[in-house]
Image: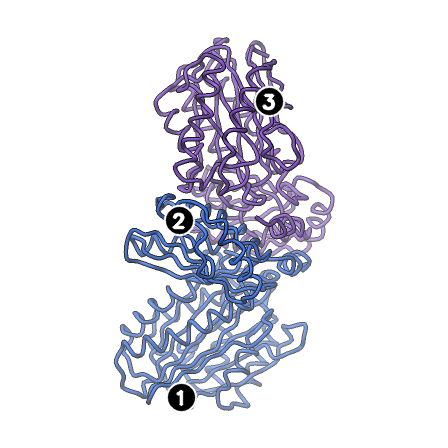
Chain colours: A purple, B blue
Amino acid sequence: MPDILMGVGKAGLKESGKPDILVVVLPYPCVSSFLFTDNYFKAGSVIYSERVAKRTEKVSALVINSGNANCGTGEEGIMHAELMARQVAQKLDIKHDEVLVFSTGIIGKPLPIDRVLKAIDDACSILEPLDLERASEAISTTDSFPKFDFVKKEQLETFGFAKGAGMIAPSMATMLAFVFTKADVDYETLRQIHRDVNERTFNSITVDGCESTNDSFGLIALGEVQANPEDVKAQVFEVTENLAKKIVEDGEGATKVIKVTVKRATLEMKAREIARAVANSLLVKTAMYGRDPNWGRIAAAAGSTEFPIDPFSMKIYIGGHLLYDGKPHPKAGSMAKRYLEEEKEIEVVIDLNEGRNSWTYYSSDIGYEYVRINAEYHT
Amino acid sequence: MPDILMGVGKAGLKESGKPDILVVVLPYPCVSSFLFTDNYFKAGSVIYSERVAKRTEKVSALVINSGNANCGTGEEGIMHAELMARQVAQKLDIKHDEVLVFSTGIIGKPLPIDRVLKAIDDACSILEPLDLERASEAISTTDSFPKFDFVKKEQLETFGFAKGAGMIAPSMATMLAFVFTKADVDYETLRQIHRDVNERTFNSITVDGCESTNDSFGLIALGEVQANPEDVKAQVFEVTENLAKKIVEDGEGATKVIKVTVKRATLEMKAREIARAVANSLLVKTAMYGRDPNWGRIAAAAGSTEFPIDPFSMKIYIGGHLLYDGKPHPKAGSMAKRYLEEEKEIEVVIDLNEGRNSWTYYSSDIGYEYVRINAEYHT
């Protein structure tokens, strides 16, 4: 572990009374890239941090509050984010425009800013080395387990932590992830790695197809190790994919992780759109919950995008069992059903039999527990 | 009622043993327009009828089977549809390429074609005047009530029947609707009316966002009454909108109809896309099921399309109660909550405050019953 420090505080934003403020302090200003939600109904913290990130390639600290999304809170929300950054900067004697701010939690409630600033003070007063597990816990909301990962190959290390339990809970959507690589790379290279990895990981998972107002993903290069950009990318991908899979696993009420792969498509975008349509299909998700190898729903979802498919040459597999290849294979159904009953990670493959491109989406099933969590919560 | 005749038969396609074949016989070849699903995984019956409809502007009869979608059944499925059309033509002494074929029911099982042809014979042998309620029942699958409507203004009459209970049940998606107007209009006029009405009705409803392999909507002009095209369109719209609303009401497990209106948008397409995003949002649907006036989820869904919204000038109302207008109005929440508890049809309005275009989508809530119906069914 490098000399990244962290501090936690409590502003009383969570009913549980657990830590809800995390400050992460880098050893020096580090080349960093940030990606934010595409949602136009953005949180004040996102609007603020997006603006700061545009102006600087180097970041010195992050401050994250959980339990309140600081979203739908008007202009005051943007001011509150700036106050949080300035508080960190003042306490640590760094530049306030090298501090980024993130929030996750309930939408539409103003931050109790005095308590938040006080908790930031506390967090900055007791800094200790970054502990990935505790960091993940400090930023979690409805998560049922902390999410972090660490990989090392020779001198090169990459590690990160995240939160997110689907896009789901009680107006508490949001995925936050922060990944750190020891590599020494310039901003342009880091940015390209960041975008590419994000497309195949966080942009290829879905729990309920709903896009959060607060999603943010940061990639920070510590600049300590010389490395080939391809190796850096591979390691960042590995850590990020693991974080993404943990988020899907923790989708509210999920009993299965569903891995949907579309292969042999003419275009990468086609493979991706079809994988997304199948991964997002409520009919597919409920069928998986019911352990039903319902290839008809998979086929109908695959046919619903703007990209033509040929129903007579496509093939559909569940767990390696061929269920359809232009005509149904009813006998494979019982084996596929047993597979669905026994396995925790379900592999669905749609082979378009027409080209060389493929894409994988990770999804989860949807059952009664999803409805309970999302219907019985009251604002 | 004009001299439209119908006959029903039983091919044993439904477990209930109820009628599953409907033949509708027009008094003479009538100018007709048909719209089919955009899904590329189309049923054999859709592939066949789309081809026939392209070649003819006039139709003499319709044959519909329920209980089996004739989908995913390979080339044989297309042949079976043709055999059904030829059987009707032969029995009624009409041209087989003026007969259209429709199917709804389970995907991936071959039609028992001998039994189907026999039932078509039976249906053609006992023709009687069209009864909208019985016609709807004969084509229904998981519907919990028949769907039909009739309007008359002076000499002009329009009427129709439909089936569809969401897009939902057990590989049994599909909406079918047939609307008849007494008006005398040419094909081009009828086609334009048909497309326009369809966009604002069946293309503006959603239960689970899943698109069927078999959806079909026919509009038939009996040519008996001279009328202004605008009056014809208004009447066709009225009947079709009523059929569309009945389908949403019957969404599996639905306890509420949710009417989502986006108003004062710069573009019609923008209003439509945002209305669709909100109407399709699983978080919004589960919140409505839970009687929770969760405007944050509505805002997040509205912000998730490719069209920019301004979070600081948009307004969100539930049942006329202003919940957000750049900042939250927490006091309106309890009134909106009472409204959600008491009303069966819920009005959600998103006022973008920027232009002149609006669009309305009809949706339904999603609760435990939806999961039960769709997870506990087994193929």
Looking at the image, is mark 1 or mark 3 nearer the viewer?
3
Calculate the distance from the C-alpha at mark 1 to the C-alpha at mark 3. Answer: 80 Å
Name the residue beneath numbered marker 1.
B27
What amino acid type is highlighted by mark number 3?
Val
The relative height of residue B33 versus residue A52 in the rendered view (above or below) is below
> Can you identify the residue that label 3 sits on?
A8
**Discs 2, 3: same chain:** no
Check contact, mark 1 vs mark 2: CB within 8 A: no
Graded by Cα atoms within 10 Å as few (under 14), some (14 to 19) or many (20 or more), the crowding at tag 2 reads some
Task: State the residue in front, A36 or A73.
Answer: A73
Q: Amino acid at mark 2?
A: Asp
Residue A306, x across and y down, in percent? 41, 51
Residue B251 appears at what percent x and percent y? 56, 65
Residue A73: quarter of image: top left
Residue A355: image quadrant is top left
Q: Which marked residue is nearer to the observer: mark 1 or mark 2?
A: 2
User: Which of A85/A230 is in front?
Assistant: A85
Q: Chain of mark 3?
A: A
One can see residue B167 in this view: no
Chain of the residue on which disc 1 is drawn = B
Horizontal relation, residue A266 to residue B131: left or right:
left
**First of labels 1, 2 by sequence position:** 1
**Residue at mark 2:** B325
Badge 3 density bin: few <14, some 14–19, many ≥20, Cα 10 Å: many
Residue at point 44% right, 59% down? B260
* Number of other residues with Cα within 10 Å of mark 1, as a class: few under 14, some 14 to 19, many 20 or more: few
**Which residue: 54% across, 24% down?**
A118
Q: Quadrant of the N terminus of chain A?
A: top right
Q: Could you tell me if residue A163 is visible in this image?
A: yes
x then y, percent, for residue A316: 57, 48
